Amino acid sequence: MTDAHHQEVPWDGAVALDLPGKLLLIGLSFTDAKGDLKRQEQCWGRVTSVDSRAGISLVLEGSRHGENFSLPPDTRSIKPARPGDYHLRSTGEVVSNPDYMVTFVVHEGEG
C-alpha cells in the first residue's frame, strides 16, 4: 500500500483541462482507522477551477446548493459518466446526465 502524502499523485492534464464548467458526481466513502466503512455520501456540482497543486474546486448543486467543495489534485478516479439518471442513496436526489463521476475513500479517526 502506498502513502499518497509522500508521493506525487497522478494528474492527467487532458482530463483537468476538460473539467471546468462540467457537472461532476462525487461519491465519498468514509472509513475508520482500521479501514472499516462507516458511511457513504454523495454530492454533485459544477467544477469552477482545477489546479495540479490546489486541487479541483466545485460549487455544489441540489441539497447542498451554493456550497463550495474541494477535491484533492488527483484525477485518477475521474471517469466520464454514462448518460442517464443517477439516484443518490444518501440524499434521494436524482442527477441527470452528469459529465463525470469520481469516487474517493476518506480515512477518518487517524492520529
Image (cartoon, grey):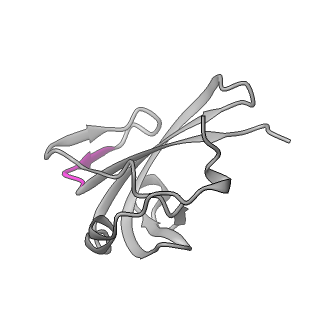
Task: Tell me where residue 109 appears, x and y as whole percent.
Answer: 78, 37
Residue at the spot x=72%, y=39% of the render?
108
Q: Nearer the viewer, residue 2 or 14?
A: 2
Residue at the spot x=26%, y=69% of the render?
14
Q: Was residue 96 drawn as part of the magenta stretch in this picture?
A: yes
Task: Tell me where residue 93 appears, x and y as whole percent.
Answer: 35, 43
Magenta stretch bounds? 94-98
Task: Tell me where residue 31 appears, x and y as whole percent.
Answer: 65, 31
Occupied quadrant, residue 89: top left
Residue at the spot x=56%, y=73% of the render?
54
Q: Nearer the viewer, residue 6 or 105?
A: 6
Task: State whether residue 74 is above or below residue 33.
Answer: below
Occupied quadrant, residue 53: bottom right
User: Which image quarter holds the N terminus?
Assistant: top right
Q: Looking at the magenta stretch, what is its main secondary structure?
A: strand
- Farthest right residue? 111
Left or right, residue 99 beside residue 31: left
